[in-house]
Every structure is written in C-alpha cells, then in structure tokens.
Amino acid sequence: MGATVMVIEDDAELRQIYRQALEREDYVIYEAVDGADALERLEEVSPDLVILDMMMPRMGGPTLLQILRQNPRYNHVRLVVITAYPQFRESALNYNVDQFLTKPVRPAEIVQAVRSALDA
C-alpha cells in the first residue's frame, strides 16, 4: 500500500481523474469537495500529501493553506496545488507548497508531481 493522498477539489470529474491516476500507482486516496470539508476529513485521516485546488466554495485553497501551515499537526503533510489561476503561484509558494501546477494537467503530470513532492 502506498502513501495516502487527500484530493481537495470541488469538480467531481477532476477528483475522479486524479483518483484513478493515483490509485493506479498504489496511492490511497481520500477526497474532499472544498477546504471546509477537508478540515473535517483531516480529523479522521492524516494524509502524507494533499492535492489542493485554490478556487472552491465555502473555503478556498488560500485559507486552507494558511490553516495547514500554521498548525504543527500538519507539518509533515506535503502540498501540491493544482489551479486554473496562475496568479495564485506566488501566494502558494509563500506557504512552501511542494509543487504548483496550472490546469489543465495530464494524469501523468499529477502522478509525477505527487512523486516529486513525496521524495522531497
């Protein structure tokens, strides 16, 4: 069994694509539909890595990044940001994300970003 990954993405189709690509590589996948949902799930699951979209309802990526990076409980979690908005790059990098990808991304790019982040 591989590393655990939480995919936080409001688009169900993209969550499914990410899940399928990563499960083929033996990662264990958990899903959340936005930042608020992710915080609830993080009470139950301690993933090795989080894939995070930036623009989501209820709680977006920037707020969740801040919460994750300010809480020592999540210091070990690697972060991969995947967003359609390249202007988020600077703010994401300020929170020491491990990888930053701009949509659209191919499944192979997602797998490579996860591998790279986990190997860092």
Image: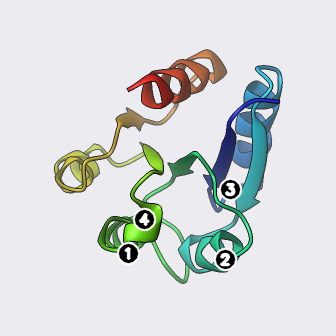
For label 4, the residue is 61
* Residue type, numbered disc 1: Ile
Reading the chain from its start, which is encountered first: label 3 or label 2?
Answer: 3
The Cα–Cα distance between marks 4 and 2, rounded to whole angstroms, is 18 Å
Q: Is residue 83 visible?
A: no
Residue 120 position by quadrant: top left
- Residue 39: which quarter of the image? bottom right
Residue at the spot x=66%, y=45% of the render? 5
Of callouts 4 and 2, which one flags the residue occurring earlier in the amino acid sequence? 2
Closer mark to the observer between disc 1 and disc 3: 1
Label 1 packing within 10 angstroms: few (<14), some (14-19), many (20+): some
Q: Earlier in the sequence, mark 1 or mark 3?
A: 3
Residue at numbered disc 2 = 43
What residue is disc 1 on? 67
Query: Is disc 4 in contact with disc 2, using a CB cutoff of under 8 Å?
Result: no
Tell me where residue 112 appears, x and y as whole percent.
53, 18
Residue 24: x, y in percent? 82, 21
Q: CA distance from mark 1 to mark 3?
A: 22 Å
- In three-dimensional space, the C-alpha distance between marks 3 and 2, rounded to whole angstroms, equals 22 Å
Left or right: 112, with 87 as reference point: right
**Residue 56 shows up from this direction:** yes
* CA distance separating discs 2 and 1: 13 Å
Q: Residue at x 38, y 75 (%)?
A: 67
The residues bearing labels 4 and 1 have C-alpha atoms spaced at a distance of 10 Å
Mark nearer the N terminus (2 vs 1):
2
Q: Amino acid at mark 2?
A: Glu
Q: Mark 3 falls on what kind of element?
A: loop
Q: Residues within 10 Å of mark 4 (few under 14, many from 20)?
A: many
